[in-house]
Amino acid sequence: MKYALRELIRFRFELYESFRIAIEQVMQHKTRAALTALGVMIGVLAVTLMGTAVGGIDKGFNDSLALFGKDVFYVGRWPWADVGSDWRYYRRRPRFDFDDAQRINQIIAQTPDSVLEMAVSRDDRYRTVRFEKNSIEGTRIVGTSSTYPLVSPMELDEGRFFSEHEDASGTRVVVLGYDVAEVLFPSVSPIGKNVVIHNQPFEVVGILARQGSFMGMFSMDEVVVVPQKASPSARWDHRDVDIMIKMREGADKNAAYSEIEGAVRRVRGLMPEADNDFEINRTELIEAQLGPVKQGVTVAGLFITGLSLFVGAIGIMNITFVAVRERTKEIGTRRAIGAPRRAILTQFLVEAVFICLIGGAVGLGFSYILQELGKNIMPMFPLVFSWKLMLIAVCASVATGILSGFAPALAASRLDPAEALRHD
């Protein structure tokens, strides 16, 4: 026990001396230390920036899926996937209309212990929206019912949503998306004003809160919502309606899917042996399609960062071998006066790790600055710089120092004292 305690105290002293010598060597050879740390700095910079980007992709992906609602199913003619040459098959499927959602709601109400909450119809058209001299072309016009807020994750920033009476009567009222309101009404409140959609005036009754964009590809705020009977496509026989069906909180998704399938087949009047002539889409389909893309980005990032750290480690190993050669007499002297091999090994390992930590700290500083600049340049892309990422960078720096410094340190510890003292 006393021997073990004595060895521990001795090792602590050796570690302290190794840190002191490492600091002295860095101060004496500032340029060489800076160039040695440069490789690690670039490697850590690559690690943190790639981790920030991957974390941002994950956050953006999850935030984008939340815009669709993870407890909402979308029933329509088309699947959320590339149908390739089969597009004619899906195009020939019968369309849904606004009344189909009401029929599904009746089935839900008649189903004991239903895991479904509500069905809401929705159709999309793209039209120009104008207010006086301001206009936005290609704005997405959503025609839906007054119950739309109950199945959609959207929130109101100002005003109200249209009422059941306005929905039933087809009153020309509109709820503007955040970006639409900012463009059409840059300096005044839109509430109570009239905008023109498809040559028809619509009174603005509400403004949606900012929702953001889906994976940075299209904005969810460039939208206006109107009662379904007032929709530009309400009088068209060939309108294409989707039905959003929300399941009850805590319900099993597979059970909800099965119930939806049965309800829609009843509405369609399909025989038991007939195939489905509709699709039930959910966010898992998007996850399945984009998952390989995320994995590919992660693998590519790991390869790039690993290569950067490998190059930095080679540079540190080379410089450490040079330092061992330059200080051979010093090593011989220390060994001759009784320094154990462990002390020599620890000394050069600590020096390599110390230089790597300097490079890692500088790399972290630069990556934080670049991340802040990225937030200002690309505010729509969520960058995630966390303490976990900092911990990974520090661990990577230490690991690089140990791996790159071990071989030179081991060579130094194995030098014969007599041969080392005769070294010129």
Image (cartoon, rainbow, N blue to C red):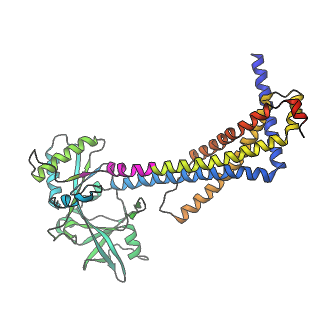
- Front residue of 400 and 19: 400
- Front residue of 386 and 292: 292
Q: Position of residue 106 (x, y in %)?
A: 14, 51
- Residue 380 in sight from this viewpoint: yes
Residue 170 lies left or right of residue 379; in this view the side is: left
**Quarter-wise, where is residue 135 in the image?**
bottom left
Residue 56 lies left or right of residue 229; in this view the side is: right
- Front residue of 56 and 335: 335
Q: Of all residues shown, which one is farthest toward the bottom?
A: 133
**Quarter-wise, where is residue 223 in the image?**
bottom left
- Which residue occupies 80% across, 40% down? 324
Q: Position of residue 260 (x, y in %)?
A: 20, 47
Q: What is the number of callouts on the image? A: 0
Q: Is residue 283 magenta?
A: yes
- Residue 15 in sight from this viewpoint: no
- Which residue occupies 62% across, 58% down? 369
- Which residue occupies 91% across, 35% down? 422
Q: Position of residue 86 (x, y in %)?
A: 22, 57
**Quarter-wise, where is residue 330 in the image?**
top right
Segment colored magenta: 280-295
Identify the main secondary structure in magenta.
helix
Q: Quadrant of the C terminus?
A: top right
Q: Is residue 59 magenta?
A: no
Q: Judge whether 295 appears above or below 374 on screen.
A: above
